[in-house]
Amino acid sequence: MTIWILWAVLLGIIGWMGFNYLRLRQAAKIVDNGEFEDLIRQGQLVDLRDPADFHRKHILGARNIPSQQLKESVGALRKDKAVLLYENSRGQRVTNAALYLKKQGFKEIYILSYGLDSWNGKVKAS
């Protein structure tokens, strides 16, 4: 009996992860360092981390809009330009931000695969 409960829980977790992955894929495109760097020139680069992390180190040209302030700051972003999102690693903040921006009518949303932790392009560090 306990094994069936464990299997049900495991299948539920896998199903939930799959559902979230599919939702994210509909909202944004996850890109590698090279493609992300090419897109920076034509898009709006948004760092979703808190201000202290941003000031310590961020991708050159990024603006800091902490994920918890995105709803209040969405008016600062243009819907006619691509939005490029990143955080330290690809986690829940970037997923939630992409889904929210998609609901707000943004068409082109890109996420840096594995985030700043794997970024090998130009950065500004203090």
Image (cartoon, grey):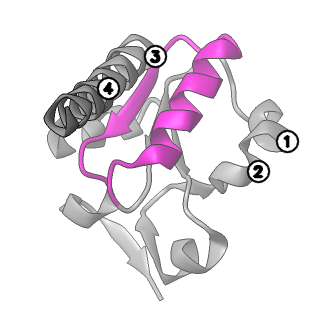
Tell me the residue that label 3 is attached to.
27
- Does label 4 or label 3 sit earlier along the sequence? 4
Residue 52 falls left or right of residue 61: right
Q: Amino acid at mark 4?
A: Gly
Q: Circle 2 sits in a helix, a strand or a loop, which is it? A: helix
- Label 3 CA crowd tier, 10 Å (few <14, some 14–19, many 20+): many
The Cα–Cα distance between marks 2 and 4, rounded to whole angstroms, is 31 Å
Mark whose residue sits in front, 2 or 4: 4
Q: Circle 4 sits in a helix, a strand or a loop, which is it? A: helix
Tell me the residue that label 1 is attached to.
72
Res. 41 image quadrant: top left
Badge number at residue 69:
2
Tell me the residue that label 4 is attached to.
12
Q: Position of residue 89 (x, y in %)?
A: 32, 57
- Does label 1 or label 4 sit earlier along the sequence? 4
Q: Is residue 39 magenta-colored?
A: no
Badge number at residue 11:
none
Res. 4 image quadrant: top left
- Does label 2 or label 3 sit earlier along the sequence? 3
Look at the picture and state if 3 lies above or below 49.
above
Q: Residue furthest bottom?
A: 126
Q: Amino acid at mark 1?
A: Glu
Mark 1 and 4 residues: CB-CB less than 8 Å, in contact? Answer: no
Residue at 37% of width from left, 36% of height from top?
111
- Label 4 CA crowd tier, 10 Å (few <14, some 14–19, many 20+): few
Mark 2 and 1 residues: CB-CB less than 8 Å, in contact? Answer: yes
Start-end of magenta stretch: 89-115
The Cα–Cα distance between marks 4 and 3, rounded to whole angstroms, is 23 Å
